[in-house]
Image (spheres, helix red, strand yellow):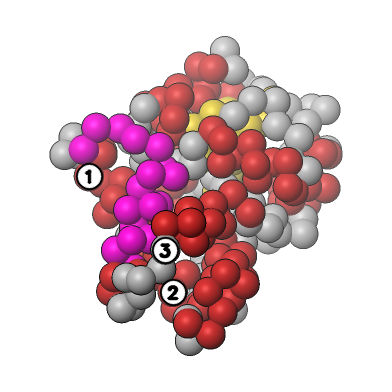
Amino acid sequence: MPAVRALIFDVFGTLVDWHGSIARELRQILGPRVSDPAAFAEAWRAQYQPAMQAVRSGALPFCKLDLLHRHNLDRVLADLKLDDVDEATRQQLNLAWHRLDAWPDVAPALHRLRPHFRIAPCSNGNISLMVDLARRNDLPWDAILGAELARDYKPKPEVYLNAAAAFDCAPAEVVMVACHSSDLAAAAACGLRTAHVARPDEHGPGRGERRAETPVDHQAHDLLQLCEQLGV
């Protein structure tokens, strides 16, 4: 096997706590109008894969995740009988995805990894969203890769292969890092190496993957342990 030259990262769940952050934003913006912010966050996230599948299948042309998030938000607000939420508030809510907080191990680990490897997100999130999360959480990326450059959504092979090609790497020189076994299985099928990072609280306390459900090259309880496994 060739030496590892780059690491690419899933972002939602793997690097940032979308569940806790979206619930916080809902409490701040909608206040008592939302009786269960955690359930609202879950309902919003539940629309994520179906919306992207419409793009992956060709039923919709490619569009940025911000736009899909907004369509999904409108649907959830309607389901919760909150149709009277005004346009300015909806825009503010949709940008909550740009204000997610990283897990505590993420920034220190990325700063350890970057002197030794090229590093970038390989997310379904659009470039401006990734930039805002990086600026908020001190994520020292070498580039922003992922769906917007590939013009498709994971787990389509183009997304992983486009990211490897952007760094002038063969797939086997790149490690895909994620807390979702399905993401890693798709990356492995494209020839990338894989690393599973446990995020047992991704969907709330005790509601996330603790171990990979597919064969992986690395299994770590957080990104700092992955650094140790990679010798940095």
CA neighbours of label 3 inside 10 A, class few (<14), some (14 to 19), many (20+) = few
Asked if the residue under mark 2 is in contact with the one under mark 1, i.e. CB atoms within 8 Å, the reply is no
Q: Earlier in the sequence, mark 1 or mark 2?
A: 2
Q: Residue at x 54, y 29 (%)?
A: 145
223 to 122, vertically: above or below = below
**Is 97 left or right of 54, judged from the image as shown?**
right
Q: Where's residue 181, x and y in %?
A: 45, 54
Q: Residue at x 48, y 56 (%)?
A: 88
Residue at image mark 2? 40
Query: What is the residue that sits farthest to the left in this orientation?
Result: 59
The residue closer to the viewer here, 91 or 133, is: 91
Highlighted range, magenta: 60-76
**Which callout, 1 or 3, points to the residue nearer the camera?**
3
The answer to which image quadrant residue 110 occupies is top right
Q: Circle 1 — which element?
A: helix
Disc sitting over residue 138 in the figure: none
